[in-house]
Every structure is written in C-alpha cells, then in structure tokens.
Image: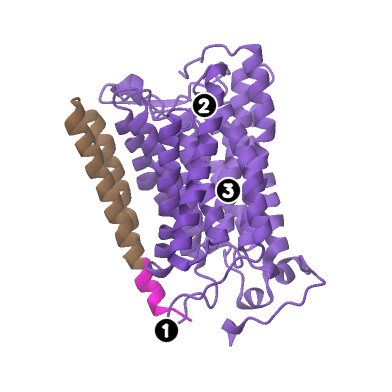
Chain colours: A purple, B brown
Amino acid sequence: MIPISPAMTDAAFALALALLLLAPLAIAGVAFINTGLGRSRSAAQALLGNLAIVAVTAIVFALVGATFAGSLPGTPGSAGFVFQAAGKPWNWLGAGPFLLGGLAAAPAQAQLAVLFEFMAVAMAALIPWGSGADRFRLTAGCAAAAAMAGIVFPLLAHWVWAGGWLSQLGVNFSLGAGFLDPGGAATVHMFGGLSALAVIWIAGPRKGKFPKEGLATALPGHNAVYILFGCMIALVGWLAWNLAGALIWLHAPLAALPVTAINTVLAASAALVATFTVTRVRFGKPDASLCANAWLAGLVASSACAALVTPGVALAVGFIAGIATPLLVEFLELAVSIDDPSGAIAVHAAGGLLGLLAAGLFAPQQGQLVAQLVGIATLLGLVFPLVYLLFWVLNRLHPFRADADGERIGMDLHELGGGAYPEFVIHRDESYR
Amino acid sequence: MKYAGLLVMPAGFFLSIAALTLFPAPAPRAGFVLCGLAVEVLGLVVAVRGHMQARGGSRP
C-alpha cells in the first residue's frame, strides 16, 4: 500500500502550488537553450518541437502514465502491483484511476504530486529533443516523448515518488530513507540524459559533423542570447522546482526552504565560475555555450541534493559539475564520436548522477549512499536499455532522422515550410560539398 | 557489439538487486552493489565502442 504522507499545512500547500506554477519556467529555459544550441535553419522546428512535446507528454501522461505512476493514494487500486521476493514486498507498478478519475477528491498533497509529475515528464522528454537537433523529425520526437510519458516515466515516478520499491529501500532493507530524488535528478534528468544518448545513437550525427578525416567539425549554436537568457529563466524555474520537490516529497518544513534555494543558486554559480575558468585557461577566452551548459549542470546536480546538503557541499558539487561538464562535452564529441548539440548527456545525465551521489554521501541517514547507488544502477542498467529498445522499435516504425534533403535545407523549411528568420540570408553549408 | 553491451547492462542491474536480498550486512551489500554498477559501466563501454566501430564504417 502506498504510504499516506503526513498532512500538509494550508500554508505549505499554497506555497507548493505557487511554486509549481513557476516550475514551467525551467521547461521554458531548457527549450530556449535547446533552440539556441541548434542551427538557425532549424530554430522554428526546434521551438515548436519543445512546445509539441510538452503538449504530447501532458496528454499521454493523463491518458496512460498517471494510471501506472499511481500517485493518488486512497483511490481504488492505488496500492499497485506488488510481488514478494526474499520475504520483502516489491511494489513495481502503480494502478491509479484511469484518466485521473477522483483527482479532485484526492488529498491535497497527492494532487500536488500529480501536478509535479506533469511538469517532470515534460522536462524529461524535452532533453532528448535538444540532442536530436537539426535531424530529429518533429513527429518522431513527439512519438518518442509519448513513449517516455506513457511507458518509462510512469514506472520511474512510481518507483521513486509513489511508494514504489526504490522509495521503500529504507523500510525494507534499512537503506537510509530509501532512494531520494526530491527535485527529479534521476526521474527527470538522468532519465532524459540517457534517453538523449539513445536518440543520438539511433538518429546518428548531423551530416558533416564527423568527416572521414580529421577532427569533428564544430557546429556552434546559432543564438547565444537564447542560450544565456534560457539559463536565467531556468534558474527561476529550478528554484521553484527544488523547493516544491522538498515540500512534496521530503515534507520539508518551511524553515528549511531558504537553505534549499541558496544551495540551488550556489551549485549553479559554482559550476558557471568553474567552467568559465576552465574554458578561459584552455581556450584563452570563456566559452558562452559551455558556461551555459555548466550553469544547467549545476542546477541539475542541485535537483538531487539542494534540500539535503549544506551550502558548502552544494558549492563543492557545483564546482565539480563545472569542471567536469566542458571536459565531458569535449570527450564525448572528440573521443566517442557523439554528436550532442545540447550537451544533454554531460549536463543532464552526468549532472544528475553527480547530484544523486552527493545526496547519498552527505545525507545524514545510514545506508543512504547504497540506496542512491541502487537507484543509479536501476537507471543505467534497466531504464537505459529499455529506452533504447523502445526508441529502436519506434525508429523502425517511424524513422527518427529526416532525409538528406531535410538536413540540407534545414528542418524549418523541410518540416514547416518556412524559416524562423525569413528576412535573414541563410548561408550555404560548406560541409555538404 | 553495441547490442551485446546493452544486454550486459541489465545483468549489472540484477546483480545490484541480488545484493539487497543476499547480503544483510552493509559492507558486502555495498560491495556487491558496486560490482553491479561496474558491470553496467562495462556494458556501456562495450556499447560505446560498438557504436564507434559502426560509425567508423559509415562516415560520410
């Protein structure tokens, strides 16, 4: 049975609701960053794709996902599916009401949980869309988002947030407080980052990215203003997201929220300063898009640990994220031939991993680190192959990648019939010669 | 090779889960969970190498 959480005070409910209404700013920020990091001839398709994915995930999650996430305790069937192994219950699948039936009558906190999940699934599905920039078809992106929202995310959300087996590791195996992920570092960001890797492998690199001879071609983002403005919006959204997560999933007292907010800002700030320094030392000048990636990586890492650690630890986590992000982006591109325009693997997958480890290392409960490791093992060993399989099947049914003509003229003209910047002269791409 | 790597990764997950049920003591349990994670990382490395080989043969 899903544990019924302690009742939320009216003040905490009102605050959590207000915060969740600000959380879409994080989604908007990531959408801006995704668009700015792509090329100008695909900008309208990229931004429309972000919007379409938010819409598709909301519909699919309401139709199918929320039922299996099972976040409405007290409704018929909400206990979910449980099997017994080694004398312990393993709650592996939720069984909530169809089409959110009974939502209005559910406890206030459960309604907030469902609203949080709606935001979370949209954010998770946006992440691979950014990585497939300039070659990922709009309809295929929506299909991938539907698969994420209807099949994989509900499983994860149930396991981590709705009384599933990962959240019960503390009760059943004395592993701290069970797997902790108040801001969605695993359920949203690591999941999204690993899905991005699956999309990149299946869709392949952009044409001309990896020539037969020589190093990878640099295909820089087309609009640094979008990217950096997206970072600023994302900060507001992330603050709201982390505070709402602490209230809903950790039942944090109101007095604990300022520290969570400060930790969020510190993690992002330290990451930015670290990358600014690393790129300044390596390239002679700071790199704007890598600094933006690091800012986001710091925010992602804070999703797991901002509500659980001290400001000093948040600063250290951000600093490590800031050093690792540019190096990892470079390694993935140059050493592993991964064409990830938005840097989702370094930012979301690695950033989320770092935050989850920090939460395990610095949380006061005994055994918390092992609980976090089991959660990470679940994402890497079970969720990633499952997502790859789903995307592989989807790609067979409806190819992810646009045809060569689409790549040549840009996704805007190919898929939408018009560009984002019709008055601009589009330069011919030398890499197609 | 990529698919072999992807198949190894769930094996690492099941190792980690087995650790929870087989070892009540914290130290061996943590060690076994880490072994499971190591197997997953190994699977990922194999998959990445397989992907690179496949890409190497089909570069434009």
Judging by the rendered image, the residue that carries numbered circle 3 is: A125
Count of marks, rendered view: 3
Instruction: Confirm whether the magenta stretch covers residue B56.
Output: yes
The secondary element bearing badge 1 is classed as: loop
Vertical order, B15 against B26 (above or below):
below
Of all chains, the one bearing label 3 is A
Q: Nearer the viewer, residue A414 or A334?
A: A334
Amino acid carrying label 3: it is: Ala
Q: Image point 35% across, 23% down: which residue?
A: A364
Query: In front of the other: label 1 or label 3?
Result: 1
User: In the drawing, does residue A64 fall left or right of residue B27?
Assistant: right
Residue B45 locus on image (x, y percent): 31, 59
Looking at the image, tell me whether mark 1 or mark 3 is earlier in sequence order: 3
First to last magenta residue range: B51-60
Task: Give the vertical position of A417 relative to A248 (above or below).
Answer: below
Give whichever of discs 2 and 3 has the lower sequence position.
Answer: 3
Residue picked out by circle 1 = A213
Which kind of residue does numbered mark 1 sit on?
Glu
Position above or below: A18 against B31: above
Inter-mark Cα distance, 2 to 3 = 29 Å
